[in-house]
Amino acid sequence: MKAVVGWCTKTQPHEFRIDRSLLLPFINTTHTRLIMSQPQNHEPLASFYNLCELFERLANTRGTDLKKRLFQRYLHDWRHHFGYDFYDAMRLFLPHLDRRRFNMKEIRLARIYTEALGLSRSSRDAIELIKYKQPPTSTSPHQKKATGDFPAVAFDVINERSTVLRATRTIHDVNNLLDKISEASGNDKATINIFKDVLNTYMPLEQKWLIRIILKDLNIGMTDNSILQVYHPQARERYAHCSNLEKVCKELQDPYLKLNQSTIQLFQAFKPQLGTRDRPKDFSSLHHQGRFYIEEKIDGERIQMHFDQRTKQFMWFSRRATDYTSMYGGFPDKDNLARNVVSCLKADTLILDGEMVAYDPKLDVFLPFGTLKSAAKDQSMDMHRARPCFVVFDIVFCNGTPLLGYPLWERLKVLNKVVTEKYGYLNLLGREEKKTMDDVTEALDHAIQMRQEGIIIKNPNSVYEPGARNHTWVKIKPEYMNSSSDNFDLLVVGGSYGSGRRGNKLSQFLCVIRDDRVEDDENPRFISFCMIGTGYTLDELGDFKEAFKDHQPYDPKRQPPWLIHPEYSSERPDVIMSYKTSLVVEITAAETISSNSWGTGYTLRFPRFVQFRRDKSWKDIMTWSDMLRTMRRQKTREVTSGNFKQHRKKRQRTTPTASGPTRVQLGLLGSQQGVDTRDIVEASSLFLDMTFYVVTGDEAHSKATLEAMIKENGGTFMQQARNTQYVVAGTENILVQGIIRQGIYDVILPQWIVDCVEKQDLIPLQPKYMKYTTKRTEEAFSASIDKWGDSYMQDATEQSLREVMERMPLNVNDDTRELANEIQERYFQTVHIPGRIFQLVKSYIDDDPPDPNIDINDMDMTWVVKQRAHERLEMASVDLRFRGAEVTRKIEDGITHVISDENDMERIPRLIKAFKNGPLPHFVTTEWVDACVLNKTLVNEKDYQPKLPRNMLKEPTTP
C-alpha cells in the first residue's frame, strides 16, 4: 500500500467508519462532551518535515482565506489518518500559547549553535549568527539571507554543514525534544548536548522551524484566533474562558460537536473583561432603570484569585494568564497574602476579580504601581512595611457555579455574602449608585481631591464577558495641564544620535502605532507617529541603549515592509531595529496635532517618556483606530476641562406649527442673482475666454459692479463655483466660508479685477490678491514669491516694498519666556531647549515660611522643620527659574506643577480643591525638581507625588 503523500512512510490500518448522523440521538447536549468516548489517535506518526513544508507554504502565501484553506486541509488529513487528538500539532502551530518555557532568545540560541557546531567564536558563521540583525558582509556567502531573521540565518549556516539527508522525526518526537529543552532551561551544557543531537537527526529546514517554535513566533501570517476558528467554531471563545490550549484541544476534538455556552472553571485562567476609554456621548449604555455605578479606578495590576475551601488552595493569575501563585501564596501555610485573606472567604469555591496594589499601612494609602513587586517580595518582619493588598470589585464563580451571565448587581450581592473585608490585605471596592452627569462630575471631583487615578462607570445590569472591552464599563481619568487625558502606549523602533555631548549616543527615539487596518492573519504593519527625546532618566536611557544593541542603519529608500514612514520626511531616525525585539513605552503629550512628517498624518505635541511597559508587546500598543478615536475625543469633548463640570449646550430645535411645515419655493437669493447684462457693451477683450464666479464684492465694489466690469472686458460670469476658472470674494459670508472649507478653489480678492481693468493687463496672481489659496497654488507661489509677497524674480519698487512691509507683522517681544516658548514650539518639539528643561513648566510653590524675626528662645522643632522646608522650596524655586520655568506663589490659570516639601504638606488638600475646576496641575515634592536637574529632563511625576495619609484628604477645608 503506497504511503499517503505528505505523511510519514507507513501504511495506515483500515478504520471502521460510522455515519455520525446516526449518533446524534446519543449526544448529550447538556454536557460538554459526547457520552461516547472521543476517538483516539492511532499512532503518533505525523511527519515533522511535512509540517515544516506546510509552514513554508503558509509563510509564502498571501491572503487570509487561502492560508485558512491550507490549514483546514492539513487538519482534515490529520483527523483522517491519525485521529482526532490534534494537541501535539496545535502546540507547534501556536507556540506562544504553549505553557512550556525555554528561556531562549536569538542571542542565546546563536551561542548554543556556535558551540554545538564547533565553530570558533571569531569565525565568519559564528559572527553571522550573533550579529544576525546586521546585513551580510561582502565576503559572506549568505547574500540572500533575511537581515534580522535569525531562523533564516541559522538555516543558511546549518545547511552548509548538515549531513542529515532523510526526514525521520515525527511531531511526537519534536514535542518530546521541546520538553527536554524546557527541562534543561538555564543549563547551557545540557542544552548544547541536546542541540548536538538535533544537528545529527533533524534536517536544516526542520531546524529552521524548530527555532521559530522555540522563539514562539512562527511568522506565518496567521493569528491564534484564525487557527482556533478553523480548528473548531467554538475554540476561540473557549480559549478566552480558560487560557488553556490543551483543554481546548481535548474538549473540542470532535469538529461536529457543539458545546453549550463556554464558561470559566476553577484554577483555569481566563481573559478578564476590560473597560473602554471612550467617553460616551450619553450614558444610555451605562444606565439600568435610570441608574449606574461609579467606582474608584485603582492603579494596580489586574489579578484573578481562585480558591478552594476544602483544600485551602489558592491560585493567582494576571490578565495575561501569568501565574503569580508563588508570589502571593498557593496555601495559607507561610507568611503570604493567602494566609492573611483565607479567613475572609466563606464560599466552598470562588473566583474573585480585582486589582493587586501595594498598600502603605503607615500612611493608609495605595502606592504607585511600580512598587507592587518589591512590596510582594519584602519578607522583613516590619509590621508597618508596604505589602500587597487585593482590592476586589467582582466575583465570577461561586460554589461551583459560574456567574458570568448574572447581572453585576446580583454578582455584587453574592460577593458581599461570601467575602468579608480585611482592610489592608483584602479590600472590597466601594461604589455609589448614581443617576445624572452631575453625579459623575461630583465623583470625578472627589477622585481628584483624594488623589485617585480616576473613576469607572458601570452598568448595574451588565453581564461579565471574558476578554471583552465594551461600553458597559467606562474609564474616566482627570486631565492634567500640558498633557492629554490619555497616555499613549507606543512601540520604539528607531533612534537618532544626539549632538554635542550626546553626539555618539542615541538620545531620541522613533515611536510607531500598529496599523489595525491590516488583516490579523497578515504580517503586522506599523505607522510612524512621533519622536521622543525627553522624560527618561540616565538609567532608563541605558535601557534604551541596551535595546538598540543590535540595530541597522535607517535607509528611507529601503524601509522594512512593516514600517510606514514618509520617504522624504525631515523627521528620520539614524538607526532602526525590528519590531519583534523592541520596547513598548508609555508617552504623555500636550495634544495631538496634524503633521505631514509622519506616516499617520498626525503627531504628538511635546511628547514625553513616562515609563517602559514591559508587560506589553507590540500587539498591545496604540492602533490606527485608537488614534482616530483620540482625535475625535480631542475635537469633540462632551465636557470642558476634562472633568464634566460644564455640559455642552443642547441645540435649540424649532417647534413646527400646528399646520405643519411650510413649503418653500427654491431659487437664488437676491444677493446672488447676476447683474442684467443686456445693456452692457464690451469695451475690451481683457478677460476673453475667462469664466468668473463673483460670490461677494467688497466695501468699494459691489457684486453687480464687478460682474459688469467682467462683462465689459470680454469675460463671462456664472452663479456657481463648478466649471469656473476664477472665484472672487471680498466680504465673507456663509457661501464664501463653504467654498473655502472645500479647499478646492482659490478665492481671489476683487482688487485683482479692479487692478487688471485699470492697467488693461492680466496681472500675475500674488498672495496680496488672495483671500484663500489652495495648497497647489501655495506651492507655485513659494517657487517665485516669499511669504510676504516679495517676488524673487521681479525688481522691487518703492510701492511694492511698502506693500510688503505693511504685510509683515511687527513683533516686538520683550517677554523672554514667551520668546523662548516660541522657539521651543518651532525648533524643539521633541527635545528641550539646551539648559531650559523647565521651559514648559509653570510652578506654584507651596511655601509657608516661618517667622524669620522670632526670638531664638522661641525656636522649637516645628519652626526648624518649617525653616528647612522653606529653604528646600527656595532652592527648588531657583533651580526652576534658572532652567526656564515660570514660578508663582499665587493660584492662577496655567499652573502645571505644584511644588511641596515632603515635611510640610498640610495645605495640599486645600490646594487640590482650589484647582479641581480646571485641568489639574501635577502635585510633586522638591525631590522631583532635584531628579529633573540630575537627569537633565522632566522625569515621571508619578514617582514623586506627595504621600499623604488618607485621613488628611477626607475633609478638605476651603482655602
Image (spheres, grey):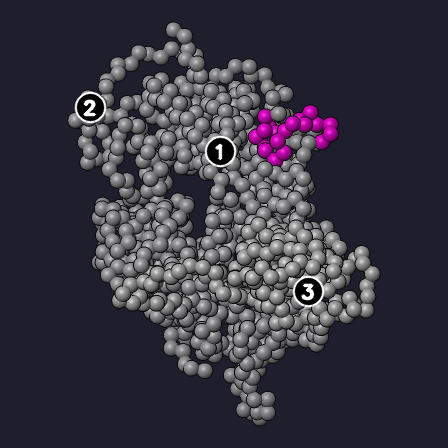
The reply to whether residue 267 is in sight is yes
User: Was residue 146 drawn as part of the magenta stretch in this picture?
Assistant: yes
The secondary element bearing badge 3 is classed as: helix
Q: Is residue 628 left or right of residue 795?
A: left
Q: Which residues are magenta?
A: 137-155
Which amino acid does the dot numbered 2 rest on?
Answer: Leu
Which amino acid does the dot numbered 1 rest on?
Answer: Gly
Q: Nearer the viewer, residue 21 or 94?
A: 21
Q: What is the number of the mark on residue 23?
A: 2
Q: What is the number of the mark on residue 493?
A: none
- Write the residue at 71% across / 61% down: 756
- Write the residue at 70% across / 70% down: 809
Residue furthest left as drawn: 25
Name the residue that disc number 1 marks: 221
User: Was residue 813 drawn as part of the magenta stretch in this picture?
Assistant: no
Q: Is residue 182 left or right of residue 44?
A: right
Q: Is residue 435 left or right of residue 383?
A: left
Q: Nearer the viewer, residue 556 or 884?
A: 556
Rendering coords of residue 903 (x, y %): 51, 76
Q: Is residue 854 above or below residue 8?
A: below
Task: Give neighbour class at mark 3: few <14, some 14-19, many 20+ (Cα, 10 Å).
Answer: some
Task: Give neighbour class at mark 1: few <14, some 14-19, many 20+ (Cα, 10 Å).
Answer: many
Q: Nearer the viewer, residue 455 or 763?
A: 763
Q: CA separation, marks 2 and 1?
A: 38 Å
Q: Is residue 932 above or below residue 23?
A: below
Name the residue that disc number 3 marks: 754
Rendering coords of residue 819 (x, y %): 68, 70
